[in-house]
Amino acid sequence: MNGQRTFFYQVGTFAVGNRLLDPAMRAGQADPDRANALTSGHRACQGCGEALGARYVLDAAMRATGGKLVVVNATGCLEVFSTPYPETSWRVPWLHSLFGNAPAVAAGAAATLRAQGRDDVRVIGQGGDGGTVDIGFGCLSGMFERNDDVLFVCYDNEAYMNTGVQRSGATPPAARTATTPVVGDRSGNRFGQGKDLPVIAMAHRIPYVATATVADLRDLEAKVAHAMSLHGARYLHVLVPCPLGWGTASGDTVRVARLAVESGLFPVFEAEHGEVTAVRPIRRRVPVADYLRLQTRYRHLFTPTRCDDVLDAIGAVAEDNIRRYGLIEHRDVEHREVSP
Amino acid sequence: MFAVRIHGRGGQGVVTAAELLSVAAFTEGRHAQAFPSFGSERTGAPVVAFCRIDTRPIRTREPIAIADCVIVQDPTLLRHVDVLAGLRPAGSVLVNWAGPVDQLELPPGAVAVAATQLALRHVGRPVPNAALLGGFAALTGQVRLESVLDAIRGRFPASLAAANVAAAQEAYDLVRAECEERQDA
Amino acid sequence: MRSQIEGSRAVAEAVALCRPQVIPAYPISPQTHIVEALSERVASGALHPCVFINAESEFGAMSLAIGACATGGRSYTATASQGLLFMAEALYNAAGLGLPIVMTVANRAIGAPINIWNDHSDAMSQRDSGWVQLYAESNQEAVDLHVLAFRLAEELSLPVMVCMDGFVLTHAVEPVDLPDQAGVDAFLPPFRPRQVLDPVAPVSIGAMVGPEAFTEVRYLAHVRQLEVLDRLPDLAGELAALTGRRISAVTPYRCDDADTVVVALGSVLGTLKDTVDELRDEGLPVGVVGVTAFRPFPVRAVAAALAGARRVVVLERALAAGVGGIVTADVRAARPGVACRTVVAGLGGRPVTRASLRAMLLDAVADRLEPLTFLDLNREVVDRELARAAATRRSGPAAENILHDLAGGGR
């Protein structure tokens, strides 16, 4: 920006148009020569947050590594919708082994690259929340503690969507899934359960941990680029709404992701070596009900009667996040200063 | 085929003793097979190791039930373990014991050597295995002392090897003298 | 070079001669000495640029090997028993993906009840995993099989399991001749994978395959396995030029004119051969067939080796509860119509002694052997436990009851 400060005043979305930016600062997706690592034609549902997230993550990583990337994928939606062979949407070297071993397979790939002196080729492992926080957790934790040279990306849609929306360790309280039904006085997933994987990752003191959402794709790209500038074990946890599993409109994916952040339910931050280094502040806090109401997995909280006690309990979760991460350090603003 | 069974306790180098004995026989151009009684015994628990020596390749893998020689690294085992089980009538017994051998209920041919004391004096630790191997060479003549000493030298770092070699040498001399004395008697 | 060396150390030396690039490992008895020795060599720089990885589990270890191999690195690991079972999903995956990983299995029983001693339950449980399975009779054979395994695996893009009896071989110190580095280098060229994760030529590996092609993919896996039997003689010949020792899928011993032949795998063959020699000296026409390649199963070679036999005894080091023998089924298929008895022996480390084998063979020759025999079974403790279970509903844990009986407790 040649030192010039630019103010973006936009209404509602906080989105920034590329046309206002210096070409070097433009989004990776604005580049007509982008890698298209996950190219068109795949079989993801309309409005799939995971497909959106994976495309941005991998293209950003391809840009950061000069196209020298190897990708290992856990079993799950992303794997299934991307490779209905003989078609494949991957334009990167890509391996799917099992549901629970993607972090280890990725670490094995990194080991060979090290043994062969091909340090310029980098490795990304990726999976959904089931493959990350549940069945793949042992391998992930092993990869973390050994500080293997892998960026692992979790596309978190908060349940086992590939198998038909069952509860995972990342399913939030009160959410209805096929295995946390709303029956009688049972109100979806229980409170007081679940894993906070970014924090668990931080406890391994690995070089880099970050969270992001598909609501702020510039932020997502920047975090991938930063992650690829580092070596050792890195973890990126991306919230990716699932229209099918969440019961949201296909056109609302980005909006719902944004509300998850703005309600305080999904803190967006970065941490290095176990210490939080940056937090994306909530710019205009919204009540959790605004976020929940758009999703049929929470419909039981609003009809036939509004469950204020449950909504308050979810609100307390948001409040706790806000306090813990200092998500509201500044007064609510509708404009933000950006400097290069 | 000459079959040796070594009884001791975990931590006394019983398995190492069998291995060293096999190496000594191997360096003399014979075939040898050493293996432990396999278990999850911790330090102090009774353990057994085996060594077969032959002029032909050894194929059998069964534990040694019929022994030509039994080495007892810890005399307290005599109260708990039938160390003499399957010992051939003319078989040898070498026991780590500082007192007169007739204090122990062993066959008449049994020979005692104060291997722990020798180890403490030369090595500084109560590991009687090397000394007993020296004694074994003198008692049975199955391997030469020099082969045992070479096996020890090949296994341990120089200073530790030298200490164990000294213990084995002294045990060899003591047992040899004892055997000669008995022959004369 | 010939030396008096522990089996595990000898195998580690052999693996090192094969210049592995990635060795992920997780400790489990009785394979630990192998990977300990390799980690030492990696740490000392002797195996440079090999990477040794302390995995978080056997599942992790095999998964690391999968990633390493798919990226073009020569990959090796070792495991046993529960560890092999913990790997099971990844084993099928490695085979399905056609990744030529080499693994030592230090054969050990599977619990419950937990048992660290030797039998073949572990490897037998994975016989259909798509891995080639080679069983070593001695530490010398284990060494030779490892060198062969890397070549075979990489040439055919198949993972190979070298099975060696836990403790009986891994912890035995005996003479082993190791080939020299130049010879192994000549025998085993650098790994040239059929498929590899490479940014220069990106491919997708591990896609979903539906009903339209799954049968064909599996059929090819079968064909690929059978190719092992075709290639093995040539490769074994090449290796024999280096070592002077020839590996065969099947090795008959004193089978000429033998009307009773025992089929077995692994280290029990040594004791068995000694027993057969003894009986031969007494004029009994008995022989032994050692099966080195169990997967793929060398049907023709086994049939040929058993061609003259009137009675076949399959000595099994594992048990398929509810059926009996495991190897027996394959032997029967190779020699249909011949009386085939199963003897389950040496489970969970029970020594297989010459005395018991002799008695069993005498029974076999006299046609006194039951279709399924448990060698050295303590019938008394079994009957007592059966009686206990019949007498009272809450009879307690069977294994603990039996141990109590054996200790003279009696209940």
Image (tube, coloured by chain):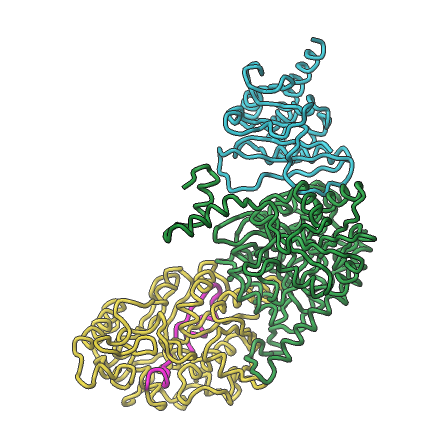
Q: Position of residue C124 (x, y in %)?
A: 60, 59
Nearest the camera: A231 or A170? A170
C93 relative to A215, above or below: above
Q: Residue at position x 64%, y 50% from top? A: C12
Chain shaded cyan: B
Q: Colour of chain C?
A: green
Indicate yes or no whether the magenta region holds residue C331. Answer: no
Q: Which residues are magenta?
A: A221-247
Residue A171's spot in the image, x, y percent? Answer: 33, 73
Farthest-out residue, top: B185
Residue C101 in the image: above or below residue C105 = below
Quadrant of the image occupied by residue B6:
top right
Quadrant location, the N terminus of chain C: top right
The front one of A92 and C230 is: C230
Residue drawn at point x = 68 percent, y = 43 percent: C359
- State which chain is coloured yellow: A
Residue A28, image x and y in percent? Answer: 46, 83
